[in-house]
Image (tube, rainbow, N blue to C red):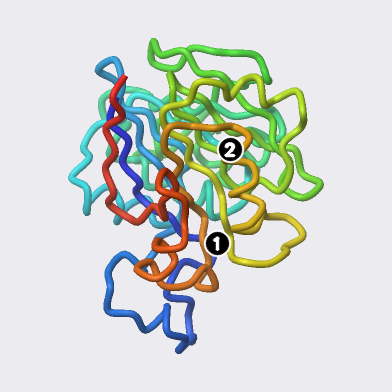
């Protein structure tokens, strides 16, 4: 398995427009964060986790020319804003999108021209597969959805093999912890130090990591208030890391 962190930032990205803080003006490229998205390569397949507005540049930067499936966590723009840019991937075959009913409906409402019976030439060739909390197969790979709460909004994280992706969560229902046992890699939100109503803080992320006990944990969906990469890393447990754009992880299975 190979995991590429395509983007590790929150909805505004980092630098945030107009901000002159030490993170937004940092010269360390690890402090510049596109909107959160992860690519998982396993069993000869490439599965994209979320497709935000930076998707086009993420594909160009990482030289990714083929995708087998796209899994969407929820309908917020920073997680679906790049779906129209899937056009090149659908020239010769349909692009399979996996999402819950309410997310599928939001996508169909947002880009209705993609799903009309009579399509004009050049629209993205997408097919939405509606999923539930039950395990499903995407491109021949078994995927286990994880229910998480984004404030009051129920959304999905995903487990693929021994890695899990939990973005935008604030709370994790008690029943879901059993689905996260034995992880080699956990990608999990840590918006910033200090309380936030809909995203977990750095402190809350560390508490969940301590309970889930993955071999390695990578923090994602961070704002500029997380602090400087080089400084924050020094204060984390040895198996916990700030992910950064372009980071590639190959867990030993």
Q: Nearer the viewer, residue 172 or 71?
A: 172
For label 2, the SS is loop
Circle count: 2
User: What is the x, y in percent for residue 234?
Assistant: 40, 63
Vertical order, 100 against 218 (above or below):
above
Q: Neighbour class for label 1 at 10 Å: few (<14), some, many (≥20)? A: some
The part of the image, by quadrant, that contains residue 145 is top right
- Please state which of residues 88 and 213 is positioned toward the viewer in this rendering: 213
- Tell which circle, 2 or 1, labels the residue nearer the N-terminal end: 1
Q: Is residue 91 left or right of residue 35?
A: left
Q: Which residue is mark 1?
A: 11
Residue that lies at the very extreme toward the left in this rendered image: 63
Q: Position of residue 169 (x, y in %)?
A: 66, 45
Q: Residue 32, image x and y in percent?
A: 36, 68
Q: Residue at x 50, y 21 (%)?
A: 182
Q: Is residue 9 above or below residue 38?
A: below
Specify whether 204 is left or right of 93.
right
Distance from disc 2 to disc 1, alpha carbons, whole Å, reads: 14 Å
Residue at 45 percent across and 30 percent down: it is 126
Q: Circle 1 — which element?
A: loop
Instruction: Please state if 203 lies on the left or on the right of 72 as rendered.
Output: right
Give the percent coordinates (x, y) of residue 245: 33, 55
Q: Where is residue 40, by image quadrant?
A: top left
The C terminus, quarter of image:
top left
| Residue with the mark numbered 2 | 73
Figure quadrant of the N terminus: top left
């Amino acid at each position: 398995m190979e995991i590429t962190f395509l983007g590790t930032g929150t909805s505004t990205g980092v630098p945030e427009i107009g901000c002159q803080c030490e993170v937004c003006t940092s010269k360390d490229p690890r402090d510049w964060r596109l909107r959160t998205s992860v690519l998982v390569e396993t069993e000869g397949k490439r599965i994209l986790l979320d497709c935000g507005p930076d998707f086009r540049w993420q594909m160009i930067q990482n030289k990714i020319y083929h995708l087998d499936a796209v899994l969407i966590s929820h309908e917020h723009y920073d997680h679906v804003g790049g779906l129209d840019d899937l056009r090149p991937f659908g020239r010769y075959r349909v692009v399979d999108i996996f999402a819950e009913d309410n997310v599928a409906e939001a996508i169909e409402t947002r880009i209705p021209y993609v799903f009309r019976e009579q399509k004009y030439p050049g629209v993205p060739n997408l097919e939405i597969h509606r999923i539930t909390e039950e395990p499903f197969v995407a491109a021949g790979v078994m995927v286990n959805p994880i229910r998480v709460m984004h404030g009051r909004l129920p959304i999905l994280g995903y487990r693929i093999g021994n890695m899990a992706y939990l973005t935008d969560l604030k709370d994790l229902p008690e029943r879901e912890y059993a689905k996260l046992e034995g992880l080699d890699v956990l990608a999990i939100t840590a918006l910033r130090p200090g309380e936030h109503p809909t995203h977990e803080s750095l402190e809350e992320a560390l508490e969940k990591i301590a309970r889930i006990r993955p071999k390695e944990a990578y923090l994602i969906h961070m704002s500029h208030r997380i602090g400087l990469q080089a400084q924050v890393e020094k204060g984390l447990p040895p198996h916990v890391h700030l992910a950064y754009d372009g980071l590639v992880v190959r867990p030993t299975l």
